Image (tube, rainbow, N blue to C red):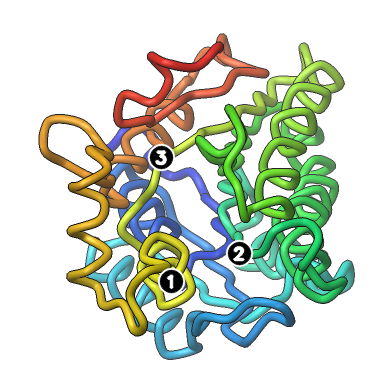
Amino acid sequence: MGTLNGQVALITGGARGQGRAHALALAREGCNVVVCDIAAPVEGVDYPMASAADLDETVRLIEQEGRQAVGIVADMRDTAQVQAVVDRALEAFARIDVLVANHGVVNFAPVEAMTDEQWNGVVDTNLTGVFKILRAVIPPMRAAGYGRIIVTSSSAARGGFPNLPAYIAAKWGLIGLVKGTALELADTGITVNAICPAAVATDLFFNEPTYRVFCPDIENPTHEDFEQRLKEHRHGLNGRPYLQPEHVSRAVVFLATDVDGVLTGQVQDVGLGLPASRPS
């Protein structure tokens, strides 16, 4: 029996990567889980997105943990689809106790070369899409007098990086969204927090556009070239150049199991040492 036995978690961007890891971690804590994902290409994003088959696999793995699961294909940029996800979760389980707003995309270009499509694809997904799922899930949580909202920001929102203007702007904006919403929901039984992972071994990080940015001197850089470049730059901590999704899931579980509701408006770094050299 887990700490969250009988609760219901809703996870966006749950078809693979961090979202799948969070879904399984919360299932092991006792949650039934609703996972949604766009499972389709996003304009201005150059790497392959998750598929409906990936989403089905996440559902299968949750059920393998002995919990109930519902998978929904939905675009968090679309208000009607966002509301339909919340309605479907309430129809299936009559409650939503935990929201992990995890969905996100990335692209690379300097400001002067970034197109409207590239900017909008990232900002509309990573920032506006999170706003929309928060807006939809707060009323049933408020009615229940309980909720744990966890938003995936990024270590990129704790400083600056070249070639990532849309991603950093959106992820930095999420921290402001979290802090403002936490104050709005004070004393309602709902907590709102952000997590800021460093680089994580997911398809958002391991893809050809990322390899080209880190290895501009190599014509067709490979995964191995990318790994070598990370080692050369001494990226990471204790010989680990990047996180695994399960490392981030520990922070998600920590915030979700704050049963007394004493943690809100906070930003939890999972930073591979990066926070030591940056202001908090």
**Residue 6 as seen in the image, left or right of residue 156:** left
User: Helix, strand or loop at disc 2?
Assistant: loop
Please name the amino acid that badge 1 sits on.
Arg
How many angstroms separate mark 2 from mark 3 (CA)? 17 Å
Q: Which residue is mark 2?
A: 108
Image position of 20 with respect to 244: above or below? below
**Residue 176 as seen in the image, left or right of residue 80:** left
Q: Residues within 10 Å of mark 1 (few under 14, many from 20)?
A: some
Please name the amino acid that badge 2 sits on.
Phe
The residue positioned 60% from the left and 18% from the top of the image is: 266
The residue positioned 35% from the left and 51% from the top of the image is: 200
Question: Residue 162: x, y in percent?
Answer: 60, 47
Which label's residue is closer to the chain start, 2 or 1?
2
The answer to whether mark 2 and mark 1 are in CB contact below 8 A is yes
User: Helix, strand or loop at disc 1?
Assistant: helix
**Residue 189 as seen in the image, left or right of residue 206:** right
The residue positioned 45% from the left and 59% from the top of the image is: 19
How many angstroms separate mark 3 from mark 1 (CA)? 19 Å
Query: Quick one: quadrant of the C terminus?
Result: top right
Q: Nearer the viewer, mark 3 or mark 1?
A: 1
